[in-house]
Image (cartoon, rainbow, N blue to C red):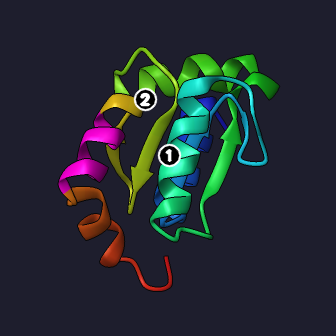
Amino acid sequence: MSVQDQIRETVTGNPIVLFMKGTPQFPQCGFSATVVQILNACGVRNVVAVNVLADPEVREGIKQYANWPTIPQLYIQGEFIGGCDIVREMYSSGELQEALAKIPAA
């Protein structure tokens, strides 16, 4: 299975996926830590986190998958939401909470 297939399977097979540097318990960059904090503030407990530092192919592949050059990247129900700045803006406006509310037991 190619890296793109692995990424597609992860993104479409889970309601909330965060490609990040590090883990939710130990983020390895401030941007990833910010997105984790926002998801925690929204009450999200079932996020599938993918540590891109553990696999260079995934790290490069996710940038191609979304055509987005930076990490972290958040996906909700298979849809690319954005990186840290977009997630922060959506949280401030309430859009993120609305998107998460559509997921059962988020």
Q: Is residue 106 magenta?
A: no
Marks 1,2: beta carbons within 8 A: yes
Q: Looking at this view, is 89 or 20 the one in front? A: 89
64 on left or right of 49: left
Which residue, given by chain and number where applicable, does mark 2 sit on? 65
Seen in the picture, residue 98 relative to 10 is either above or below; the reply is below
Is residue 5 visible from the viewing direction of this image? no
Q: What amino acid is found at the position of numbered circle 2 in the picture? A: Tyr
Seen in the picture, residue 23 relative to 45 is either above or below; the reply is above
Which residue, given by chain and number where applicable, does mark 1 sit on? 8
Name which residue lies at 68% across and 28% down: 21
Mark 2, secondary structure of its residue: helix
Q: Which residues are magenta?
A: 86-93
Name which residue lies at 45% across and 65% down: 42
N-terminal label among 1 and 2: 1
Q: What amino acid is found at the position of numbered circle 1 in the picture? A: Arg
